[in-house]
Each structure stands twice: as C-alpha cells, then as structure tokens.
Image (cartoon, rainbow, N blue to C red):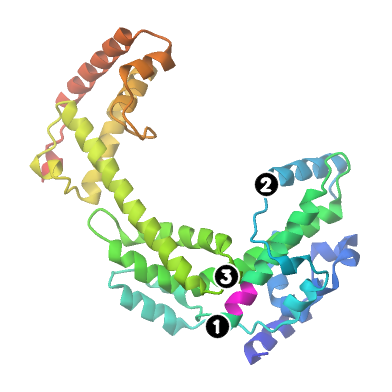
C-alpha cells in the first residue's frame, strides 16, 4: 500500500464512530465482513454524510422512504463472479493504492486546452491516470456495490419497512458513487482534450465541457469492465459523439429559429441568414422570440411552435395533425395560425432588431 493511502487509512480509522449515524443503529452488527475492509476506510469516511441515520425515523417515514427507494432503479453491469459469496472479500482485500492529486496536472491540462479558462477548472484534472489494474478494480467494486444494493432493494416491503436495510442500501450506493467519481476524475483530462476541438463562435468551451462530463459519467455507468479493453477507448467515443451531437443540435435549433423569423417576415440581416450567428446574438434572438410568443394565447402559441418546429417540437406538424390534437377543424387551425402570424408581424414592427445586425 502506498504511503499516501496508508496515511489516509490511519486518519479514517482514527475518526470516532466509523460509520457515524449508521454505527449508532443496529446496522453495524449486520454489515458483511468485506465492508469493514481497511481498503474501504477512506471511502467510508468521505461518504458518511450521504448516509442518513434513520434511528429516530417512525414507521410512516420508513414506509415513505421505502416507496421512494422502490421507485429508483439501481443499474449496474453484472458479472458471473458476483454470484460467489466470497467475491466481496476478494475485491475489497485487493490493494487499490490511488496516488495523490497533483496540482501540476491540472495546470498542464488548462494550458493544453488552448482556451482562456479560469484556473479553478484545472482542479478538475489533478487526479493522476489510473493503471489498468486500478481501473478494473474500481469498476469491479462500483458494480459489485450496486449489485448488493439492488439485491436488498428487491426485498423491500413498504408494509414492513426495514430501517437497517434502507441504511445499508444508501451506504452501498454512496460507496459505489465514490468509486465512480475516482474513475471520472482520472479521465477528465480526456474530456478537455476532446471538447476543445468542437469549440467555435456558437459553442463555448465551458458548455461543451459540462455536457462532456455528463457524458463521461454516463459512460462510466454503462462500461462493461470485463470485455478486456481500457475505459478510455470507450469514453473517447462516448464524449466525442456527445459533443458532435450537441453542436449539430444547436445548429439545427438556430436554423429553426432563423427560418421561423424569416417566415414571419422579420428581417434579421444578411449575416444571420447565413447562420453565422454569434452566441450573444443567438440568445438575444431566442429571448425576443420567446417574449413575442408569450404574448400569444395558449392555442396560438402551441400552433406556431408546432408549425415551425420550435421549442420541444422536433418536427413540423401538419394542419390536420394539430386539428386532431386541438379538437377543431383544419380550417380553424389555419385561421388561428394566420391570426398568430399577424400578431407576431405587428409585434416585430415595434421591436428594434436592428442592433442584432451590428
């Protein structure tokens, strides 16, 4: 075990009440032996606050918590070896030996991004890369913990709620999240290197980075560690595909708004018609269009959005489909659309859009 890991372990072991509120209940006597492994000391110390102490919870509260937990699926990547009663001891007796975070790694990631970023973002990239053995062990532990949580969840009964079982499920999930976060941290520099290639006038680095991190987390949760290849190979495809989809979707949304404004006879200038809209102008257009649509009545607003594929509408709806949904005739929908368009043209005439052409 590395000196840094030993130091963390000693600090965690020295802390009073190892499982905090959990130890105060009868749960402590029901904990499996592998869960009390020295290798889990640091993780348990850092996840205490995420495990509620249900000692004083009454029956009605426990029933509500049980129903809530039953509504929440626990997804994991299963493995044949998890069926063995000795698997927990094997996984958590192995040495993980994570290295300390390094400030230099974060600073280097910021410099390589080629983007003017606040220095605090570098803290996201201070975790060293994982060795193949560390990576596999983290994935094994995360999914094994989630599998154990799912097993206990499957026998929950709202009519006979179990305080100990609810606490144990929360502990398993919190520990699984801790292991997931270690994988995410070690791969954040990969996200930086991918999303910077998609940055342009319409897609800022910080927005793409946020989307990329979410994609990375989902990738960790869906990765099958037993297939024999490194997670970075899989994560590269996930993050790159997500960034490409984000850029394309935003471009399509811009084209929808610009096309809708043109169909309303709102002149937005030659530059906007070529779709070269800056981020500021784009948000201004959306904001002003949203204000104008807000002045329409409910049916008019729905018809305009559906006819021009705006907002949540991903395709252009026909007059007949809208008539069916609204329970009116096709001609009535046409009249409502014409009335709404006249209102928008009138509002556009009193709205100063000239500044968008600067």
Q: Viewer-proximal residue, 102 or 319?
A: 319
Q: Residue at x 23, y 18 (%)?
A: 343
Mark in the foreground, 1 or 2:
1
Determine whether 303 is above or below 10 in the image.
Answer: above
Left or right of residue 327: residue 46: right
Tell me whether circle 2 and circle 3 mark residues in contact (CB < 8 Å). no
Q: Which residue is mark 1?
A: 131
Q: Residue at x 33, y 18 (%)?
A: 300
First of labels 1, 2 by sequence position:
2
Q: Viewer-proximal residue, 138 or 311?
A: 138
Quarter of the image holding residue 294?
Answer: top left
Q: Residue at x 73, y 79 (%)?
A: 39
First of labels 2, 3 by sequence position:
2
Residue 83 position within the rendered picture, expressed as x and y whole percent measured from the top left: 78, 65
Q: Which residue is mark 2?
A: 72
- The circle drawn on residue 227 is 3
Is residue 43 inside the magenta stretch? no
- The circle drawn on residue 244 is none
Quarter of the image holding residue 110?
Answer: bottom left
């Amino acid at each position: 075990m590395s000196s840094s890991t030993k130091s963390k372990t000693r600090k965690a072991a020295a802390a009073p009440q190892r499982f905090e509120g959990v130890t105060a209940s009868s749960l402590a006597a029901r904990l499996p032996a592998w869960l009390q492994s020295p290798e889990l000391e640091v993780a348990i110390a850092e996840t205490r606050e995420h495990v509620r102490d249900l000692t004083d919870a009454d029956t009605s509260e426990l029933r509500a918590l049980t129903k809530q937990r039953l509504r929440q699926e626990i997804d994991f990547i299963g493995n044949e070896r998890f069926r063995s009663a000795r698997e927990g001891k094997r996984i958590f007796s192995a040495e993980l030996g994570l290295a300390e975070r390094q400030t230099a790694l974060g600073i280097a990631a910021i410099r390589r991004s080629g983007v003017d970023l606040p220095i605090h973002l570098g803290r996201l990239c201070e975790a060293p890369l994982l060795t193949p053995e560390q990576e596999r062990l983290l994935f094994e532990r995360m999914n094994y913990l989630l599998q154990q949580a799912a097993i206990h969840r499957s026998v929950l009964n709202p009519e006979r709620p179990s305080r100990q079982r609810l606490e144990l499920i929360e502990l398993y999930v919190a520990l699984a999240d801790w292991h997931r976060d270690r994988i995410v941290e070690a791969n954040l520099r990969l996200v930086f290197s991918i999303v910077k290639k998609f940055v342009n006038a319409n897609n800022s680095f910080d927005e793409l980075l946020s989307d990329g991190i979410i994609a990375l987390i989902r990738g960790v949760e869906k990765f099958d560690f037993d297939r024999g290849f490194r997670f970075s190979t899989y994560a590269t495809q996930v993050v790159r595909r997500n960034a490409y989809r984000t850029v394309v979707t935003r471009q399509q949304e811009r084209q929808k708004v610009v096309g809708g404004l043109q169909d309303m006879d709102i002149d937005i200038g030659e530059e906007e018609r070529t779709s070269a809209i800056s981020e500021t102008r784009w948000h201004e257009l959306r904001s002003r269009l949203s204000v104008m649509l807000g002045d329409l009545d409910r049916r008019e607003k729905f018809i305009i959005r559906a006819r021009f594929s705006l907002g949540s509408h991903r395709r252009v709806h026909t007059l007949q489909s809208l008539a069916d949904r609204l329970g009116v005739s096709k001609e009535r929908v046409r009249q409502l659309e014409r009335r709404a368009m006249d209102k928008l043209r009138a509002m556009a005439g009193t709205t100063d859009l000239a500044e968008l052409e600067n």
